[in-house]
Image: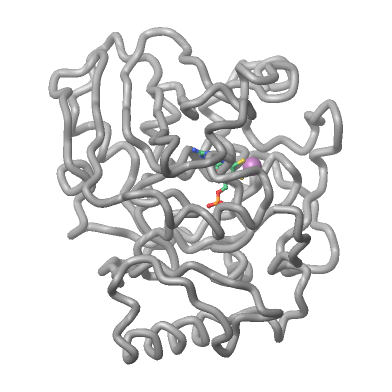
């Protein structure tokens, strides 16, 4: 914890493990017969830049179809996407999730669905996600901390998941909850947030075609640090709305509690739409640092998805409903 390690984005481009290189390393591990055994400590292989230690989890390749969702910007390297993370249940340093999230058990996984819906209950992952119809969506990812990435997610539209449960007319919002197990997530013993992590969307936001339930990235299952086995991706909102490792979905009639809003309502609103003209009380949101790039970029209204989502907020004062 006290050892300061360089982050992937601080390394020169040629030091960062490329996706191809990562694949080669996995093939090497598989050849040695150790990749399929779950978590193994891997040290000193080519590409483990600067002597970093990584825990590898066996992840399957997934079948998917490509889509037109692609901002046409350079994708952030697999190395950066999987080593520079926020998942406070495993610690608040950017490198903590990659170091500790392998301790989380993701198989078997069950999801509880409750509230205003016709078909609630307890479901296995495969009953919630149709793995035969996965899509790739390349989305911009903008953290409220003013850094950003471009990530090729795999998953299904959130609407297709929620519709299975038959939400009723009383379902005005949906709340999501993250797995919380103190034996596997050491960060839960610190009062950083009011655990378990909860997030929510207004129902029309959740049903919007851009809202996505992700189970993978870069052609493979999610690594635990990215929120395995399923996490939300809402590309027009700040990253913290993208709740990881979901174990509960609740259809509710009133605006639900959300962890960040509860921890500091002045700084983190329920909506948290990316908005370059609404400043965070402690920093500007008008520009961002794209991981892997040198110059800052202008932050785009609704993270560049304004044309698609602006109608959701027609008539709302976005400086008030931030
Ligand atoms: N359960 C949980 N979900 C979470 C977080 C977290 O700490 N715990 N961090 C959020 C934040 S602040 C961001 S920016 C994204 C980061 O996702 P990534 O690590 O896959 O890039 O996850 C979000 N989801
Ligand atoms: Mo974030």
Q: Which residue is drawn at 37% across and 88% down?
A: 27
Closer to the camera in the image, 120 or 51: 51
Closer to the camera in the image, 72 or 220: 220
Depicted 245 relative to depicted 169: above or below: below
Q: Which residue is drawn at 74% across and 64% down?
A: 5
Provide residue 72's location: percent of width, then percent of height. 58, 67
Provide residue 25's location: percent of width, then percent of height. 46, 86
Q: Where ligand 2 lies, by image quadrant?
A: top right
Closer to the camera in the image, 170 or 31: 31
Provide residue 77's location: percent of width, then percent of height. 59, 72
Q: Quadrant of the C terminus?
A: top right
Is 76 on the left or on the right of 68, as rendered? right
The answer to whether any part of residue 261 appears in the image is: yes
Is 277 on the left or on the right of 247, as rendered? right
- How many numbered discs? 0
Depicted 120 relative to depicted 124: above or below: above
Is 18 on the left or on the right of 176, as rendered? right
The answer to whether any part of residue 308 appears in the image is: no
Depicted 137 relative to depicted 189: above or below: below
Q: Residue at x 26, y 12 (%)?
A: 169
The image quarter containing residue 283 is top right
Q: Residue at x 43, y 8 (%)?
A: 254
The image quarter containing residue 36 is bottom left
The image quarter containing residue 279 is top right
Provide residue 17's location: percent of width, then percent of height. 60, 80
């Amino acid at each position: 914890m006290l050892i300061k390690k360089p982050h992937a984005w601080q390394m020169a481009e040629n030091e960062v493990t490329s996706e191809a290189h990562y694949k080669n390393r996995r093939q090497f591990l598989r050849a040695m017969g150790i990749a399929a055994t779950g978590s193994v400590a891997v040290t000193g292989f080519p590409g483990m830049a600067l002597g970093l230690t990584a825990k590898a989890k066996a992840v399957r390749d997934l079948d998917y179809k490509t889509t037109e969702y692609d901002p046409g910007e350079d994708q952030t390297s697999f190395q950066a996407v999987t080593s520079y993370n926020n998942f406070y249940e495993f610690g608040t340093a950017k490198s903590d999730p990659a170091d500790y999230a392998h301790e989380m058990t993701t198989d078997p996984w069950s999801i509880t669905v409750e509230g205003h819906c016709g078909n609630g209950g307890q479901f296995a992952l495969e009953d919630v996600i149709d793995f035969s119809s996965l899509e790739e969506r390349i989305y911009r990812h903008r953290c409220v901390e003013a850094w950003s990435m471009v990530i090729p997610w795999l998953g299904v539209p959130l609407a297709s998941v929620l519709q299975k449960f038959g939400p009723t007319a009383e379902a005005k919002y949906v709340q999501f909850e993250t797995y919380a197990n103190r034996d596997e997530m050491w960060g839960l013993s610190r009062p950083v947030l009011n655990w378990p992590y909860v997030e929510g969307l207004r129902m029309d936001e959740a049903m919007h075609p851009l809202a996505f339930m992700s189970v993978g990235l870069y052609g493979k299952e999610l690594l635990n640090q990215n929120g395995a086995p399923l996490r939300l991706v809402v590309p027009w909102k700040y990253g913290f709305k993208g709740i990881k490792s979901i174990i509960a979905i609740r259809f509710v009639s009133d605006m639900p509690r959300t962890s960040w809003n509860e921890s500091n309502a002045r700084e983190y609103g329920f909506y948290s739409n990316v908005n370059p003209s609404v400043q965070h009380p402690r920093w500007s949101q008008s520009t961002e640092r794209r991981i892997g790039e040198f110059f800052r970029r202008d932050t785009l209204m609704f993270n560049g998805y304004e044309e698609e989502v602006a109608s959701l907020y027609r008539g709302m004062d976005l400086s008030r409903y931030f």
